Amino acid sequence: MEQSVKQMLKLIEEGGDSFEEKAEMYNRKRPELVAHVEEFYRMYQSLAERCDHLTGELFKSNPSILQAQVTLDQKLGVHRSSHQSVNMDSPLSSGSASSELSLKEGAESFSSSSSSDSESESITSSINRYLGPPSNGDGKGLQTMLPSMKEKLQVTEDKDADCIPKVGTHASYEELLGKITEYSQKLEFSEEEIARLNCELKKNESATGTLQAQLESAWREIKMQEANLELEKRQVLELQKQTAELENRVSESDHKICMLKEELEETKKRLMGSEEDNEKLKYELTNEISVVKHQLEDQRALAVMLETQLQDSIIKHMAFVSDHDHEVESLNAALHNAQENFSLERAQLQSDISSLSEQVVLLDTRVEEWKAKVMEMKSLHEAQETVLQGEIDQLKAELSERGDIVQALNKNLDALKLTYDMLMAEKDELSARVDTLIADVNSWDNQIQQLEDHLRQLRIERVELIAGTESARKLVDELSWRVKELEREVERQRVVISDGAEEKREAIRQLCFSLEHYRSGYQELRQAFIGHKRLPILAS
């Protein structure tokens, strides 16, 4: 048992650096811990069977104890019968630890017998005081059996009243000395049994310490779970903040998209205005060119007309040359003047034509410049429109992706909230169970302390019994009465031990179920945490 306890403590104390390593080590060591618990239960069963066997052999080896009950009942009378009924009404223990304590106290009460009525009453009251609370079924059974047992006790007392003279006449001093020697041997045997039970009690105390260590480790695990839950809460808050920031950025992106669309509309309007200006300039330039061409044609027609008039006048004046020389000279002067005017007008027309040609060239260059500007503005507009459309598509893709991320985070948040509520419920359940176990451990400690006090009291009574032995008849009567009490007590303890064994089996099954449930809850939390860690990696 000590080796098993050491191995179990070693398995409990070993742990990993991180929470995941501890969980893996727990899953790996859980079968060994369950095996150790089952081994402790088998040891407890074998110990209970040995105790029952020794008790049966003790009563089989002492048949004279039952016959000595006759004188004891005659001596005690109605007063002792009332004590027996009180002892039968006293509750039985439902737990396994209380059953073992009651069995030990019964054996020690058998070994540490007293000679006087006051001592027997004090021992009986101490036995009744150390018995635990009854189970429901055993208490009802004892209450139904109590009237019939009282009737049998009354009949036995009536029979014992007739048998007292026979026992008194046939008893001898040698027989009493033999019985005293036999009882001394039984007393030594009981002391050895008490020592052995003390050793087992110490082992059980060590097992109790182990259970206390397990409780502390369970408390540490609960605190770690609470720390992990706090970490999950902080992460959820950070995710909520990130979600709010993403929503703000999405709204800002929508605002930017609206502004870019407005700028695009303004650019389109400006481009349309520039195209209209170009059309106006083209129309004005065409009108100016047509006007200049018309003027040039008018000047040419005027020159042709002047030339024709000049030829006509020359022909007319040549006819009158001979007659009119003076007129010829005047006409020559007029012709010279007309030629000069014509040359001046022609030069003026040539200068006008050259200036108009320069204006046409200038207007052509301006038209080409405007065409180049229009083409450049179109290309710039197309480039801006392409860039803006790409940005709009990218922002829409980011918006849809962030919407998916927000939905996934909301789902993950709901799952984490549900897991948190489940873990809090399990934590409350485990806390209640831990409080129950702590109360049981405290009650066991109190019972162990009471048992030690009772053992010291029994040792003192044994020393007083050895030092101050009184008459053999009182000793035989007292021991026979004690044997009868112990028979009834052993019968009670057998029922209690069987009930306690069944309750321990049920408690172990419940503990295994709770461990399995706790492990499954931890696996769900671990999977949720791993899934939560993968989402930021995929988002990045």
Image (cartoon, rainbow, N blue to C red):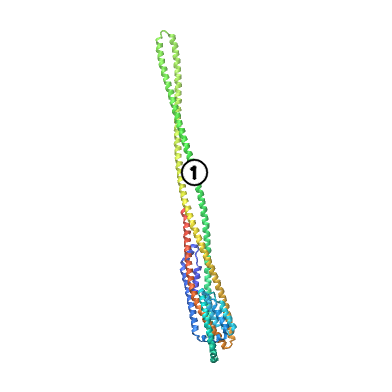
> Does residue 400 appear in the picture of this structure?
yes
Residue 157's place in the image compared with 332, above or below, is: below
Residue 68's place in the image compared with 285, above or below, is: below
Q: Position of residue 298 (x, y in %)?
A: 43, 21
Residue that numbered label 1 is attached to:
258
> Does residue 192 appear in the picture of this structure?
no
In front of the other: 419 or 197:
419
Count of residue discs: 1
In front of the other: 133 or 418:
133
Furthest residue toward top = 323
Residue 198's place in the image compared with 521, above or below, is: below
In front of the other: 95 or 293:
95
Q: Amino acid at mark 1?
A: Cys
Mark 1, residues whose alpha carbon is within 10 Å: few (<14), some, or many (≥20)? few
Q: Is residue 414 left or right of residue 314?
A: right
Residue 538's place in the image compared with 66, above or below, is: above
In front of the other: 537 or 329:
537
Q: Position of residue 94 (x, y in %)?
A: 52, 74
Label 1: which secondary element: helix
Q: Position of residue 105 (x, y in %)?
A: 54, 79
Q: Position of residue 295 (x, y in %)?
A: 44, 23
